[in-house]
Every structure is written in C-alpha cells, then in structure tokens.
Amino acid sequence: MTVHIVTDSTSDIPRAVLETLPISVVPVYIMLDGQSYQDNVELSREEFYNRLPTADPHPTTAAPSPGQYIKVYEDLADQGATAIFSIHISRSLSAICESAEVAAQQFDRIPVTVIDSGNLSLAEGLIVIQAARAAKAGMSVEEVRQLIDKSIENAFAYAKLDTIDYLLRGGRMSSIQHNVVSLLGIKPILKMNNHNSRMEIARTKSKAFERVLNTALENFPKAEVFGITHANETTQTNTLVKELCEAYPDMPEPFVSEVTPALGAHVGPGAVCVNWIRSETDPKSEAKGLKKWLS
C-alpha cells in the first residue's frame, strides 16, 4: 500500500524537504492589491513581504476550492497512491480543512482521510513531515494515522510578533484590544498546541525575542523535529539557528522557512516562530515547555 500526504501552503514546509518526501502542497489564494495569486506559485514570499506595508486594501486570503483538492487526489491515485492523508491548518483559523473535507466526500477512487492538525505554520508542517516519513518507510495506513495523532498532541508553536497592526487590519483583533495593547507598549506572544491557542505578553521587542530564544533552547534537545519560521526576519532567525547549533552541536540543524502570506497578512513583518514536536520519551515533558501554559 502506498500512502501519500497532502497539505496546504500554510504548513510552511521548506522546499528542500518537500522534494524528498511524498507530500503534495495545495496553494492558498492571496488577494493583494486587487489581484488574486496562488501562494508560492504565482506570488513568492519575498515579493509579498516587499509589497505588504503599502498594500491597499489589506491583503485577504481564500481556501483552495474542493475542486483543487480533487485534482490533487486524482493525480496521486493515477501515480499509484492507495491512500491519502490530507493534513491542514487548524479549522479554528481557516476554512481550508472544510474545503478538503468536501473534496474527500466527493472523491471515491481511494480512501482520503482529512485531518485537522490543530496547529499552524511549521508546527502543522512538522506533523506532515512525520507522517510523510512514516509513509515513505512503508508503514501501514493504521500506523501512519497513529503517528499523526501522537504528533498532533505533541506539536507546539511559539511565536513573537513585532506589531499588532496587522491583527487589527485582518480582523483578528478588535480596535479596543489594539488600543490597549498599543498604549501599554507590550508585545504579544502567540502559542498553540493540540487545537488550543493562548497568548502571553512581553514588555519589549527584545524581551519577546529572549523568550522565543529561551523556549527554543529548552525544547530543541527534547524534540523529535524542530523548525523556525519567520516573516521577513532573517537576522533574528539566524541568531536562533546559531545559538541552537552552538548549544547542541550534535543535533541536526532545525528546519527554517518563511511564513506563508496567508499567515503573514495577519502577523505582519518581524514575526518569528519556533515549532517542534516533543519527544514522548522525555519524562519531564508534561511539566516543561508550553505544557505548563496549555494544560
């Protein structure tokens, strides 16, 4: 049996990784300056972030249509896939999962299981990577599903934002919330694990980055897989990679990718997120890392 994994472009999986694993990515649509683009197909991340500060109106996003998913499922069946797991961004953040579910209901050539990752960005992508590695290793459908469920439970995202203006423009924050946060001068840190999202605050940009760095250093050696995503913020990303590699020279380097425009439109430039899947063998995992906030 040949198992293949489908995801959407919000998973932020590095291109080099995609080329080595049985993963197909369905692009999200970005409406920018009155024109619609397919993410990372018709619009690169570099171009998007260059145009974002002056975009008028504020960019909007749209989920791929069920027809686009059906086409991908058809192509994979033609190539010999006998089962598909379609893993997507948390349904609390987007309608992407619902669109894939409609497609799966209409497609009957091979079994398609649509899964809500309960996460976003590369935390979603790491779940996809783990599933694809298992599929490539020849695991059964049941074994791959069990691995996906465990990965969802143990996947974490921890992100600092440089600005909250884009949350307001994208409708993810009310004007009252925006005014209060702006008045206090605080910086939000967003956290997500297993369908649950939370927010904490830091007093300054430097304190916010310090928390991200410390969280990365704490969890990197205990992670099954680890990655960093950023929204046009290469300096802090390079610092994170350098600090992690110096602290743990025997560990493989973390994955690094840039945040998709579908998320960048809301978090804005300067966001940096560390993402990992916690190892189940860590006896202290329940008391450390994000679990202490998300329990």
Image: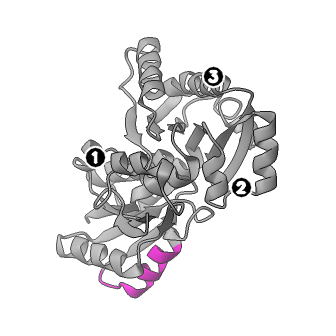
In x, y percent, where is residue 156?
Answer: 57, 42
Circle on res. 173: 2
Q: Is residue 230 left or right of residue 202?
A: left
- Quarter of the image holding residue 145? bottom left
Label 2 sits on a secondary structure element that is: loop
Tell me if residue 107 comes above or below residue 201 in the rendering.
below
Q: Amino acid at mark 3?
A: Ser
Label 3 sits on a secondary structure element that is: helix
Q: Is residue 101 magenta?
A: yes
- Quarter of the image holding residue 227? top left
Q: What residue appears at the point 75 percent right and 49 percent down from the top-left corner? A: 178
* Quadrant location, the C terminus: top right
Tell me if mark 1 has few (under 14), some (14-19) or many (20+) residues whose alpha carbon lies within 10 angstroms of its own.
few
Q: Please report contact status of discs 3 and 2: CB closer than 8 Å, yes or no.
A: no
Q: Please report contact status of discs 1 and 3: CB closer than 8 Å, yes or no.
A: no
Tell me if residue 284 comes above or below residue 55 in the rendering.
above
- Identify which residue, 3 or 192, lies in the foreground: 192
The magenta region covers: 98-109
Q: Is residue 13 magenta?
A: no
Q: What residue appears at the point 34 percent right and 52 percent down from the top-left corner? A: 132
Residue bearing the label numbered 3: 206
Residue bearing the label numbered 1: 15
